[in-house]
Amino acid sequence: MTNRVRVRTFKGYTLSSFQRKAAEALDRGENVLVAAPTGAGKTLVAEYAIHQALRSGRRALYTAPIKALSNQKFRDFRADPEIGDAGLMTGDITLHADARVLVMTTEILRNTLFEDPERLRDVGCVVFDEVHYMDDPDRGSVWEETLLFLPPEIVVVALSATIDNLGQVAAWLERVRGRPIKVVEERKRPVPLKHFLYHPEAGIFPPSRLKSLRKRFLAHPRDKRYKRRDDRPLLDELIGKEEVPILYFCFSRRLCERKAAKERRRRLLGPQEQERVEGLWEEAREEFGFEDNPGLEELRDFALRGIGWHHAGMLPLHKELVERLFTAGLLKLLYTTETFALGINMPARTVVFDSLTKFDGVDFDYMRTRDYLQMAGRAGRLGMDEYGLVYSVLEYEDVLEAPVHRIQSGRVEPITSRFDLDYATLVHLHGAAGQEGAAQAWERSFAAFQAREHSKQREERNRRRVRHLLERRFEFLERMGYIRGEREILGRGRTCLHLYGYEIQITEMLFEGVFEDTDAPALCGLLAAVLYESRRREEFWRNALRPMRGHLRRAREVIDYAREMEAAAGLTPSLKQIDEAMTPAIYAYARGKPFEELGRYTSAAPGDFVRAARMVVQYLRHLRKATAESDRAMATLCEEAVECLYRGPVDVRLELGLGQGEEEAPAWSGPPPAEAGGGVPETEG
């Protein structure tokens, strides 16, 4: 299958030049960093490394930034006859934790390095898919910490979109991993893209015409025709030319559904394709055991027209059905948010951008080149299309101001370190290496490496800033009773080591008796208040919280005190206060209310409720583990609370097509990943 001198084929595929270079580097025992456009075939390099580890009698781990990609890779590995034995650990579920190939979140891997590194003793390689996630403001530090603390004998395969500072990332990885690294960069797309712009007063036009159009638009500043927004003619032309399937990216969940609703009169499927939709629907019904309801009926009605929508607010089953229909070529027009472009292998003939601006966490601004290219890269199906088509819908202001050249063909933004040791990590480092060990960890970070490359002055300034920050955080932990002396970890500290993510809030609530005299539903509601972060304008039924008012008030007081102690230690308070927006729905569901009746308790989308409930279930399992020996009554209450919530759409086994009989394995350690809703919304506006 392989030739150790020159690898040419793998799994029946003739390897491209960049795939061959990566495979040969792996044969030499080197780490590999691969940067290539979406759809270029990076995954085949990962699979080569995995098979190589298995042939040597070792295990392989695969990490991904979003659960949809994790679930997809789990299915792919199970279907691979040379692997078969695959496991999954996303926090939502743990299946076959000792499998030869284990798909897991980076958070779980990071925490395993601290809690139980022995579990990694037989791991040969770890694949970090979408490693450019290192510069995600909320989760990037976890990726960086994992790369820092992973045992050096484990081979690292890092897959990335094209980035500007690839050499810098590689140089840092080679230094901290202590092993040669092969950088493989591929800039050529397997299916080239053609980029176009659209405005109803100008029609479809190439970017080269934008400059001349600006002069024309400037002459009509008050003409309403130039200010209108109408993408119907664009869709008419694309559909008329059969440039389908079309992925239409919107940066709002509601906009996805509104736009799909406006197109319900279109009929994009013939009789035979409609029969295939019906057949796929019945296959899914048999596999998942669902019964049609108004939401599913609406989805099916649109699917029979060849139209669909996909976003994180949908129920997992609904998203799964949409993904299967799209993969089967039965959705010709799919409105979706940007998470659909992250790793999931579902290309289209055409991509349309509803806007070139998106919310960046602070304000609306024109999107980054990297984000644009990642989504645009879904256009063009390998072996089916000569090229992919990408259209951007412009408004009047965009014609005048949009930095189109920069967005479409500018330099792809560099990775910037987000390294920021959280409290639980600091407690671990205090016990393992003392406070100086934390400072040394920062010295090895990509943040320090980047500061070092700028100037000696900047490096020293950053070193002083970080050491001062660490001193303040250790002072806070000591004042709060988590650590003492050189390396002593106290009771609170030992508990928080099992609670990565919101560890201070939950530990304080536990030690201050907030959970005393609660029943299982109230415990679920309290955890939801800590873990959940509501979206704007989210409404909820406050009267439903009456039975929990005292506990919620006490929780707020406990967290307020911890925030005051942060300030007293010279820190900007960082601990999230409680958010009650999802608590009524979680509390009602845990008390037995049917899922269909939760609309009276919250205005949140069904998918948001499911993610919040799964996050609570996950944290209940961690809390059960943390209290198993010290407080058996609390551990038992956690078990009861899991039973209350883990049913219906919250039970992830149904989403993966697993029966109730397929039991979950004991979980490794890990926090609620931010992608799952751990206080950080998915990146989709």
Image (spheres, rainbow, N blue to C red):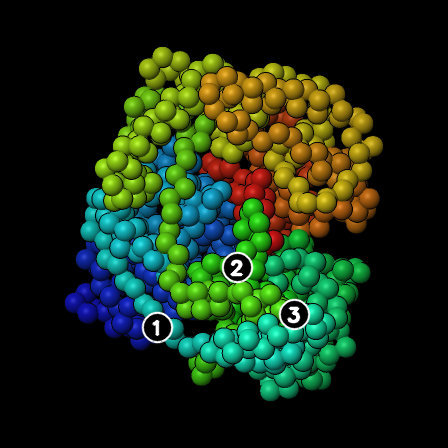
Query: Could you tell me how far apart the alpha carbons at marks 2 and 1 are, in whole angstroms?
Result: 25 Å
Lower sequence index among marks 2 and 3: 3
**Labels 2, 1: front one:** 2
Q: Residues within 10 Å of mark 3 (few under 14, many from 20)?
A: few
Residue type indicated by callout 1: Lys
Q: Is residue 327 left or right of residue 552?
A: left
| Place of residue 314 in the rendered image (x, y in percent of width and height, measured from the top left) | 67, 56
Residue type indicated by callout 2: Tyr
Q: Residues within 10 Å of mark 2 (few under 14, many from 20)?
A: some
Tell me what residue is drawn at x 61 percent, y 53 percent.
685
Residue lying at the far front of the rendered structure: 219
Tag of residue 188: 1
Whether residue 34 is situated above or below residue 107 in the rendered picture:
below
Tag of residue 221: 3
Lower sequence index among marks 2 and 1: 1
Residue type indicated by callout 3: Pro
